[in-house]
Image: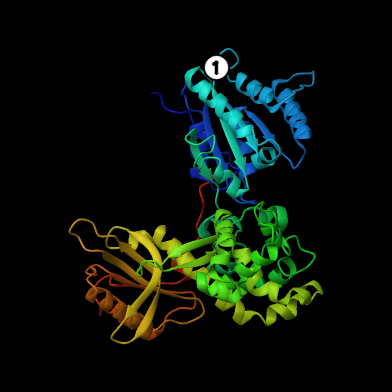
Amino acid sequence: MSGPTRPAKPAHVFDRSAEWDGLAAFAGHSLPHAMLGIVSGRRRMGKTYLLRAMVEQQGGFYFGATAATEAESLRQFAAALADHVGSSVPFSFATWDDAISYLFGLASPRNSQVPLLAVIDEFPYLAKTAPELPSLIQREVDRFQIEESRMRLLLCGSAMPVMGGLLASTAPLRGRAQLELVVRPFGYRAAADFWGVADDPALAARLHAVVGGTPAYRRQFLADDVPASLEEFDDWICRTILSPFSPLFREARYLLAEEADIRDTALYHSVLAAVAQGNATRGGIAGYIGRKSVDISHPLRVLEDSHLLVREADIFRAGKSEYRITEPLINFYEAVMRPAWARLESGQAQEVWAQSAERFAAQVAGPHFETVCREYVLGPGRTLLRSSLGEVGSGVVTDPAARRQTQIDVAVVEPGSGGRKQAVHLLGEAKWGTVMGLSHLERLARAREVLTARGMDTSRCQLACFSAAGFSDSLRSEVSRGARGEDDVLLIGLDELYGGAFRAPLH
């Protein structure tokens, strides 16, 4: 089978090399039959920007649906098709059946000798008013798995539960897709470069803790208003995030309201607030909002399906898990903005922010820093390990002799197999505002001893201290002397996390 042709990524498409390669391989595949792809991702991730660039490269068809009635959507689709084929006569379809049949007909061998890329963006809008659409597409895909076709159809949408359901269980399109791509936020290093702050790790870390890796926030929302230095961060956050005149002021609320499956937004905000306040277990969330655990199963599931919340298993304790908010701006809103909403609306941004330093450090920057440290170990930091990567996560090590628990913020564990024991390759602690010293290292060393006594293989286990505030002279001296063994201890600060000035590939 001949390989796919892959157009070069345009310079104006920042990063997204892996996503571009996946789309390019799909769009240019030489298979003489119809192919279906599903592209999803939360709003503001740049999905439309990416797909439009691919359509332009391929000379394909693009249709962006809007919230409209079935009849109006059908007219808009017909007009887009007429424009694509260069018809001077307006198209008119009586039903979506006719429209989908015509679309697939454009990719027949008599009409097209090269793959035809067709993108239907915001597909959930169409499926809501015309629920038969997935079945109609299934019929055409199945038909052109037998007959020859050059169709490369991409269905795209931001409603994550809807898009995920297209390929789930007994859904009509189950088993029909050759591509399933989720467009995610930029990683923390790419985000720093996108915002132009990669040379200032302290600023980059704070910026990412607030706005994350969402591309739209810099250019579409803030018109390239970026803090020039760490000293400008406080003024920047007051005029952009905490100002009632800024587009980002109500963005966290809009993100929640836009999810189709969310009805009682007050309940969902309470769930998110519970997690932001540190009540991250199911029982803790239920207790915080005054509900029984069974009563919050549905909102938790909806928030997970919407990719706004993620449940992370305790890497050391089976059956234990905690929830984490995936969108930094929502976490910032719940922790800092929502408790002072009336004051912020009245223009007291400076006062509110001045009084939020402790809350920001404990509930926003600190937990976010731990997540970034795990991302580092999964990415550039994996080269520091003396063994294979394994599973990266966090968890609690219970010390029965000392009757205490040690929180491990960054752990790398390789599951056992056959006669081989479960192996621990890294134990790390992450601190945002604390200068780490020997006591932190000793706590990690004790956790390693406990895991060894539990029967886990710790022979190649390294200890890692991650700190945004730095390390004490005594700790640095201990490590530099190699007192605990060569490469046994890693000290990783912001400079190491950001690796100098990161530059995402443009091509």
| Label 1 crowd bin: few (<14), some (14–19), many (20+), radius 10 Å | few
Picture coordinates of residue 30, whole percent (x, y):
47, 24
Q: Quadrant of residue 449?
A: bottom left
Give the residue at mark 1.
113
Q: Which residue lies furthest to the left in this view?
A: 419
Secondary structure at badge 1 equals: loop
Question: Residue at the location (32% across, 58% down)?
Answer: 389
Q: Nearer the viewer, residue 351 or 106?
A: 106
Q: Residue furthest right?
A: 346
Q: Quadrant of residue 486?
A: bottom left
Query: Mark 1: which amino acid?
Result: Gln
Where 115 sits versus 123, above or below? Answer: above
Q: Nearer the viewer, residue 33 or 220?
A: 33
Q: Which of 381 and 128 is in front in this view?
A: 128
Q: Nearer the viewer, residue 121 or 369?
A: 121
Picture coordinates of residue 274, whole percent (x, y):
59, 72
Picture coordinates of residue 64, whole percent (x, y):
69, 37
Q: Can residue 223 be seen in this view?
A: no
Using residue 115 as the reference point, say whether residue 263 is left or right of it.
right
Where 496 sits versus 11, above or below? Answer: below
